[in-house]
């Protein structure tokens, strides 16, 4: 372990799980939330009862209400907020980051809502093209990482030494961490798989069975590869942990909020009711709108993604979208 001090911004399930992992690995870690009541609760109970109940914080993990104090003592900044809050947080951090040039990592998955930008592009606009950045991605569920169950994840960075340092801070006997230089591919996989997970949840909610789920995952991967290659990602990334691995995880287990949302959508046939049933951020909703825009701009065919977006926009029902996909003309698989 390299013992560098981390500031984790965002005390949801994933931010908290990463903070717990870092602290267990002897990296002093501050965990900041913009909700003072949540910080107060974590200070009193030494756990995040809202998102990771029963996970006790290690001694070296400190919930923090004062962001300036956290920034002043950090060696690495790790952002773990929903994608629609990413630029807001980054803008808040910009004066400090430009002054100190601390490595910036994020575990946020998705494209920026409204612009369709990858988050490294948002960083480049704000901090410059050469700022040291890293992306942390699964396949991982927060609760399992926090419990110390065996897992693997990937750190992709624009600098090999930065990737190694952050990977070393996260790596232990129950969490194997790989490094990558494909920042684009890791982000595309992390964003687009959530849309396919909504489709898988819809199919399961309609009772369509394992055959349908397998077809959606396989053809969903094809869509992700098409998009990722067109955006500058590398094929091997989509065949690895942050592509195929994360897709399988998100589409097949009920810990996935995107899959749960799709399942609820099939039951209620109402987006707001389904969101309320999940009661957490569903990144696939935002991602679907942005990915459809980007795919159209690039001339990329993404029928599953397009149909999910159509359901979210109220243009067809969940059942209709499945038959829209099945009624397409037969064609060669590759």
Image (cartoon, rainbow, N blue to C red):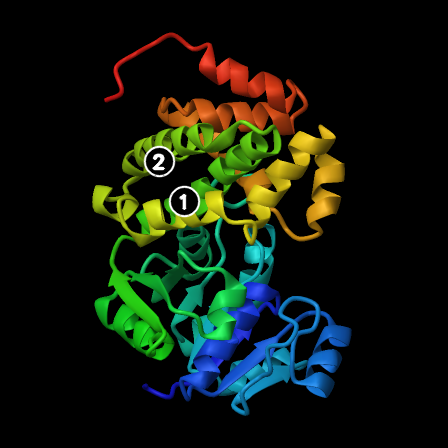
- The answer to which image quadrant residue 139 occupies is bottom left
Going 73% across and 74% down the picture, which residue do you hit? 38
**Helix, strand or loop under label 2:** helix
Identify the image quadrant of the N terminus.
bottom left
Query: In this view of the protein, can residue 96 be seen by the observer?
Result: no
Q: What's the CA distance linking mark 1 and mark 2?
A: 8 Å
Q: Can you give x and y, in whole percent of width and height, for residue 31 in the image?
A: 58, 78
Mark seen at residue 79? none
Dot 1 surroundings within 10 Å: few (below 14), some, or many (20 or more)? many
The answer to whether 50 appears left or right of 176 in the picture is right
Task: Mark 1 and mark 2 in contact? Answer it, CB < 8 Å.
Answer: yes
Please give the label number shown on residue 221: 2
Q: Is residue 44 left or right of residue 319?
A: right
Given residues 172 and 93, the one toward you in this image is 172
Residue 118 position, x and y percent, is 43, 47
Could you say which is closer to the camera, residue 246 or residue 213?
A: 213
Image quadrant for the C terminus?
top left
207 lies above or below 72: above
Which residue is located at x 56 percent, y 43 percent?
259
> Up-down: is 21 above or below 111?
below
Look at mark 1 in the image and give the residue it sits on: 247
Residue at 54% x, 50% y: name it.
256
Q: Earlier in the sequence, mark 1 or mark 2?
A: 2
| Callout 1: SS | helix
């Amino acid at each position: 372990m390299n013992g560098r001090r981390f500031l984790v911004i965002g005390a949801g399930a994933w931010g908290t799980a990463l903070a717990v992992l870092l602290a267990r690995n002897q990296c002093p870690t501050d965990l900041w939330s913009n909700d003072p009541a949540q910080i107060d609760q974590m200070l009193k109970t030494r756990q995040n009862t809202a998102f990771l109940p029963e996970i006790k914080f290690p001694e070296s993990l400190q919930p923090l209400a004062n962001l300036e104090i956290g920034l002043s003592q950090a060696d690495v900044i790790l952002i773990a907020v929903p994608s629609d809050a990413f630029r807001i947080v980054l803008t808040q951090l910009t004066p400090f980051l430009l002054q100190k040039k601390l490595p910036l990592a994020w575990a946020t998955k998705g494209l920026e809502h409204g612009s369709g930008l990858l988050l490294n592009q948002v960083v480049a606009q704000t901090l410059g093209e050469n700022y040291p950045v890293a992306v942390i991605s699964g396949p991982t569920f927060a609760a399992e990482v926090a419990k110390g169950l065996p897992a693997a994840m990937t750190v992709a960075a624009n600098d090999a030494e930065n990737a190694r340092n952050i990977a070393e801070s996260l790596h232990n006997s129950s969490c194997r961490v790989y490094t990558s230089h494909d920042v684009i591919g890791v982000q595309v996989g992390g964003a687009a798989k959530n849309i396919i997970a909504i489709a898988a949840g819809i199919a399961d909610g309609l009772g369509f069975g394992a055959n349908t789920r397998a077809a959606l995952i396989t053809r969903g991967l094809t869509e992700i590869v098409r998009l990722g290659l067109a955006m500058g990602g590398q094929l091997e990334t989509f065949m690895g942990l942050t592509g195929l691995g994360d897709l399988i995880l998100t589409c097949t287990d009920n810990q996935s909020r995107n899959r749960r949302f799709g399942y609820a959508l099939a039951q209620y046939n109402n987006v707001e009711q389904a969101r309320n049933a999940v009661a957490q951020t569903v990144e696939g909703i935002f991602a679907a709108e942005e990915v459809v825009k980007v795919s159209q701009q690039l001339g990329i065919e993404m029928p599953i993604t397009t149909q999910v977006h159509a359901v979210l926009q109220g243009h067809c029902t969940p059942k209709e979208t499945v038959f829209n996909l099945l009624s397409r003309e037969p064609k060669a698989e590759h």
